[in-house]
Image (cartoon, rainbow, N blue to C red):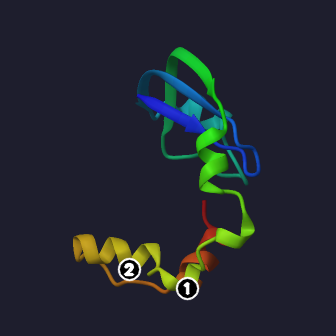
Amino acid sequence: MQLIFFVPGIDETLRVGGKGKLSADPELLASTEEFGRPPRAVLSIAVHKAYFHCGKALMRSRLWSPDVRVDRAVLPSISQMIHDQTKLGEPETQAVVEARYKTQL
């Protein structure tokens, strides 16, 4: 498994590689509680290697530049995209999705 960590505004990234395992161990879940609620599962990673990447690609992409940001209104909501892929449930607008983000983890 590979993870890459981004910090908004910073061009260098951290890549971590290792073996991952999902756990529902109550003690682990309790240790990661946020806003009074534990997660449903925890991803534990046995890190085999970790290293930084230089920022050249992010600098060329201008990822953190506000003048190249995509207007959220030009894309369908995540709910609509999932519905289009799976045909499950009813799609929600982006406003409904964002409102739920504020009240649910």
Say what amino acid the circle numbered 1 marks: Ala
Task: Give the side of residue 82 with respect to residue 35, left or right.
Answer: left
Q: Quadrant of residue 65?
A: bottom right
CA neighbours of label 2 inside 10 A, class few (<14), some (14 to 19), many (20+): some
The image shows residue 53 at horizontal and vertical percentages of: 61, 29
* Residue beneath disc 2: 80
User: What quarter of the picture does the N terminus occupy?
Assistant: top left
Q: Quadrant of residue 104?
A: bottom right
Numbered disc 2: secondary structure: helix
Q: Residue at x 63, y 79 (%)?
A: 99
Task: Look at discs 2 and 1 and give the one toward the viewer.
Answer: 1
Above or below, 29 against 78 in this view is above
The image shows residue 6 at horizontal and vertical percentages of: 65, 43
Residue 13: numbered disc:
none
Residue 73: numbered disc:
1
Q: Nearer the viewer, residue 44 or 36?
A: 44
Above or below, 7 against 19 in this view is below
Outermost residue to the top: 48
Q: Quadrant of residue 16?
A: top right
The image shows residue 76 at horizontal and vertical percentages of: 44, 81
Q: Residue at x 45, y 72 (%)?
A: 78
Q: Is residue 38 visible?
A: no
CA neighbours of label 1 inside 10 A, class few (<14), some (14 to 19), many (20+): few
Cα gap from disc 2 to disc 1, whole angstroms: 13 Å
Q: Residue at x 73, y 51 (%)?
A: 8
The image shows residue 17 at horizontal and vertical percentages of: 48, 22
Say what amino acid the circle numbered 2 marks: Gln
Q: Nearer the viewer, residue 20 or 67?
A: 67
Numbered disc 1: secondary structure: helix
Q: Is residue 92 visible?
A: yes
Q: Nearer the N terminus, badge 2 or badge 1?
A: 1
